[in-house]
Image (cartoon, grey):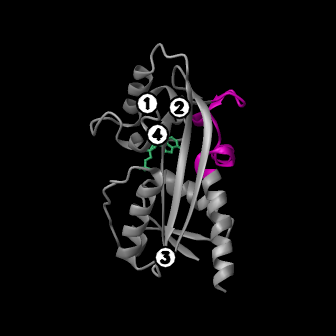
C-alpha cells in the first residue's frame, strides 16, 4: 500500500517511513505525487488537525493520505503549547527559540510533568479513515541537552532513561515516542482495515 504523507517535515517523514516500512507500507511525499497543499490547522484537537491535513492531501492527490498532528503538553501550563507547539511564540522563532521561550515560561515551576501527544489520521478516497493516538510522558528539563531529533526534543527528559529525546538514537526514540506508539497502533489498525477489505 502507498500512502502520501501530508507534511513537509523531513524528520517526521523519516520516522514514519522507518516504522511503517516494517509493515510493508510505502510512504511517499506530496512532492512525489505532484501536490503542494497548505492546510490551515483550525481544529481544536490533535485529532481534528490530523484529519484536516490528511483529508486535504487525499482530496488533492486522489490517493490515501496520512497525517500526524503532534505537540508537547505541559501540565503546569494547562496543556500548552499543545496543538500550538509548532507556532509557540509566533512566526519569528525557530525550534531553539520556541524551547527557550518554554523554559523561560516555566522558570521557577517545580511541577515539570509533560507529555508528547501524536494523533495519526489516514483518509481514503472512498471516505474511510483509520486513526490512532499515542502519548509519551516525561518531564521538562531545566536546560537543553543532546544534538539529535527536532523541535522540543532537547528539553524533553525521560526520567527512566536519564536522557532527553535529543540524546536517544532514532531507534531508541521510535521505540517509546508518542509518534512511535501512535504509529504502532495505526499500523495494526491499517492491517485490520486492509484484511477486512480483502
Ligand atoms: P505539527 O507539525 O503541526 O504536528 O507540529 C508539531 C510540533 O510539535 C513540531 O513542530 C514540534 O515543535 C513539536 N513536536 C512534535 N513531535 C515532536 C517530537 O517528536 N520531538 C520534538 N518536538 C515535537
Residue 43 point in image, percent of width and height: 37, 53
Secondary structure under the numbered disc 2 in the rendered image = helix
User: Mark 2 = which residue?
Assistant: 154
User: Mark 4 = which residue?
Assistant: 151
Left-right relation of 86 to 182: left
Residue 17 point in image, percent of width and height: 58, 61
Residue at image position (63%, 84%) is 197
Inter-mark Cα distance, 3 to 4? 29 Å
* Mark 1 neighbour density, 10 Å: few (under 14) some (14–19) many (20 or more): many
Inter-mark Cα distance, 2 to 4? 8 Å
Residue range of the region highlighted in magenta in the rendering: 158-180
> Decide: marks 4, 1 in contact (CB < 8 A)?
yes
Is there any visible trace of residue 155 in the rendered image?
A: yes
Which sits earlier in the primary sequence, circle 3 or circle 4? 3
Q: Quadrant of residue 146?
A: top right
Left-right relation of 5 to 163: left
Mark 4 CB in 8 Å range of ligand 1? yes
Mark 1 CB in 8 Å range of ligand 1? no
User: Mark 1 = which residue?
Assistant: 99
For the residue pair 88 and 31, the one nearer the viewer reads as: 88
User: Mark 3 = which residue?
Assistant: 124
Amino acid at each position: 500500500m502507498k500512502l502520501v504523507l501530508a507534511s513537509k517535515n523531513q524528520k517526521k517523514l523519516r520516522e514514519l517511513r522507518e516504522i511503517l516500512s516494517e509493515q510493508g507500507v510505502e510512504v511517499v511525499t506530496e512532492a512525489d505525487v505532484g501536490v503542494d497543499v497548505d492546510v490551515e490547522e483550525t481544529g481544536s484537537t490533535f485529532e481534528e488537525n490530523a484529519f484536516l491535513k490528511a483529508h486535504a492531501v487525499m482530496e488533492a492527490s486522489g490517493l490515501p493520505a496520512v497525517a500526524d498532528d503532534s505537540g508537547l503538553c505541559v501540565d503546569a501550563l494547562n496543556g500548552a503549547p499543545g496543538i500550538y507547539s509548532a507556532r509557540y511564540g509566533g512566526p519569528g522563532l525557530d525550534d531553539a527559540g520556541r524551547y527557550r521561550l518554554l523554559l523561560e515560561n516555566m522558570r521557577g515551576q517545580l511541577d515539570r510533568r509533560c507529555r508528547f501527544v501524536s494523533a495519526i489520521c489516514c483518509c481514503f478516497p472512498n471516505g474511510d479513515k483509520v486513526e490512532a493516538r499515542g502519548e509519551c510522558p516525561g518531564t521538562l528539563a531545566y536546560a537543553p541537552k543532546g544534538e539529535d531529533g527536532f523541535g522540543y526534543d532537547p528539553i524533553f527528559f525521560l526520567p527512566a532513561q536519564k536522557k532527553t529525546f535529543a540524546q536517544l538514537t532514532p531507534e531508541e526514540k521510535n521505540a517509546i515516542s508518542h509518534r512511535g506508539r501512535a504509529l504502532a497502533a495505526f499500523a495494526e489498525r491499517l492491517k485490520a482495515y486492509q484484511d477486512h477489505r480483502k
